[in-house]
Image (cartoon, rainbow, N blue to C red):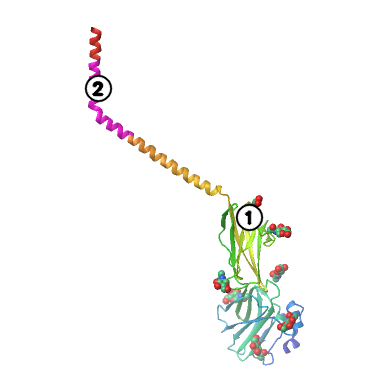
Amino acid sequence: MRLRALHPLLVTLCCGILSIASPGITSKPAGPNTTPEALERNQDGIYNYTTAEHSISIADFSAKDNKKNIVIEDVLHLKLQCSLVVASKDLQIGVSWRRNNQPISSNLYTYNNTDNLLHTTYEFVVTDTNKTGDYACVFRSGAEVNGTFHVQAPPIHGGSKALVSYYGDFIVVKCDTSTYIPQKWTWYKIIDNEQVELNISLDPQKYEELSNKLNETKLQITNLSEGDNGGYVCKATFKNVETEAQVHIKVLSYMVPLKVFLVIAAEVAILVAVILVYEVISKKKQGQEDVKKDYEPMAQLKSEDSNIAEASTARQRKV
Ligand SMILES: *[C@@H]1O[C@H](CO)[C@@H](O)[C@H](O)[C@H]1NC(C)=O
Ligand SMILES: *[C@@H]1O[C@H](CO)[C@@H](O)[C@H](O)[C@H]1NC(C)=O
Ligand SMILES: *[C@@H]1O[C@H](CO)[C@@H](O)[C@H](O)[C@H]1NC(C)=O
Ligand SMILES: *[C@@H]1O[C@H](CO)[C@@H](O)[C@H](O)[C@H]1NC(C)=O
Ligand SMILES: *[C@@H]1O[C@H](CO)[C@@H](O)[C@H](O)[C@H]1NC(C)=O
Ligand SMILES: *[C@@H]1O[C@H](CO)[C@@H](O)[C@H](O)[C@H]1NC(C)=O
Ligand SMILES: *[C@@H]1O[C@H](CO)[C@@H](O)[C@H](O)[C@H]1NC(C)=O
């Protein structure tokens, strides 16, 4: 407060340089501004919402991987805190916050020092669905160190592979949010790259929600046709975040498996035919050889016969 009163420009311009050595400078509360966060805070005096506090303690400037994952489900007021252990009281340490690598206005966070600890707090109301992202407190004194809060919506699982069914048949597409319980589920169909909400209750012959669990949704689509092909989006709406996943379905005509079957059947038929023909030919050959072997003497006999016959005809002619 005192720092702001004395050097308002210093505070706004250089995002807060805190000298540990100066005992007078202990706190820089958030100043008046017109952001939604501030309006909400001012109206209620204190935040009137479910609050979640998360902190990261940083040992020193060489500390690495000071990270924390935060899933926001029904929390409306998020209080992020970092503390840095400061060895030397003479250090000039810059304190700042960044969201997705963009600086956060210095009006919105506070910092103080107690003993050898430097604290900074950034708090905000999760007013819209896109407050997710990486929030980092950054301490700088020649070297730089940060603590990063990865604020995310509950994870949602759809299908990674396209589901396949056939014309006239039905299919069930599903999504789940594991242990997180959304307030509602909504299904969309992607038509011309746009999400069009499905009229599940308006079209009970076509669509039916099968699941009665809150952490999952199962949509049954019946009487599949060409038009049902494509991408579907399941959206889980929590108190302050939405999360969505895509599921793809592929509707096939029975002709497709039939074709495959016919091709295989034809191949088998050809193979069988080839084998049969081969067998027949090789049998014939074998047969001819056998016949040759068996009938060679007979052939001689035959020719002898014909000789006899010839002779007899000759004799007959002579007669
Ligand atoms: C603040 O909380 C109180 C009690 O929980 C509730 O009655 C009141 O409506 C809330 N105010 C707002 C603005 O939500
Ligand atoms: C300094 O900030 C921390 C958290 O940011 C808080 O817990 C502590 O009470 C504050 N101390 C003073 C003296 O303001
Ligand atoms: C937040 O989402 C809304 C639409 O839901 C969008 O208009 C706005 O630009 C987004 N803000 C940020 C900071 O991404
Ligand atoms: C935080 O520090 C890590 C290295 O520990 C760095 O990769 C990252 O870019 C830093 N983030 C910010 C916002 O400075
Ligand atoms: C959904 O929640 C129930 C408990 O209500 C749990 O048994 C089940 O495993 C959850 N489903 C998934 C997909 O995690
Ligand atoms: C849902 O119904 C509205 C009108 O009731 C219609 O305009 C819209 O196209 C329907 N959506 C789908 C996906 O059929
Ligand atoms: C299935 O859809 C076709 C049009 O795609 C429609 O003519 C037929 O009546 C539907 N059958 C049932 C049982 O809904």
The amino acid pointed to by label 1 is Asp
Q: Nearer the viewer, residue 107 or 214?
A: 214
Quadrant of the rendered image containing residue 310: top left
Residue at 41%, 39% in the rendered image = 273
Horizontal side of residue 272 vs 3, given as left or right: left
Disc on the earlier residue, 1 or 2: 1
Percent of width and height locating residue 166: 57, 53
100 or 247, which lies in front? 247
Q: Position of residue 180 (x, y in %)?
A: 60, 73
Quadrant assignment, res 213: bottom right
Q: How far apart are marks 1 and 2 (CA)?
A: 80 Å
Viewer-side residue, 56 vs 4: 56
Q: Is residue 301 above or below residue 265?
A: above
Q: Choose top left, top right, bottom left or bottom right for residue 134.
A: bottom right
Mark 2 packing: few (<14 Cα in 10 Å), some, or many (20+)?
some
Secondary structure mostly seen in the magenta stretch? helix
Residue position for label 1: 228
Q: Using the image as rendered, state which of residue 274 and residue 29 is in the foreground.
A: 274
Mark 1: secondary structure = helix
Find the residue positioned furthest to the top.
319
Looking at the rendering, the quadrant in which ligand 4 lies is bottom right
What percent of the width, then of the height, locates residue 70?
Answer: 61, 76
Q: What stretch is highlighted in magenta?
A: 284-309
Q: Where is residue 242 in the image (x, y as percent from the top left)?
A: 66, 70
> For mark 2, what is the residue?
302
Quarter of the image that includes the C terminus: top left
Residue 107 painted magenta: no
Tell me if I can see residue 278 in this picture: yes
Q: Does the magenta stretch include residue 301?
A: yes
Q: Say if 205 sits above or below 109 in the image.
A: above
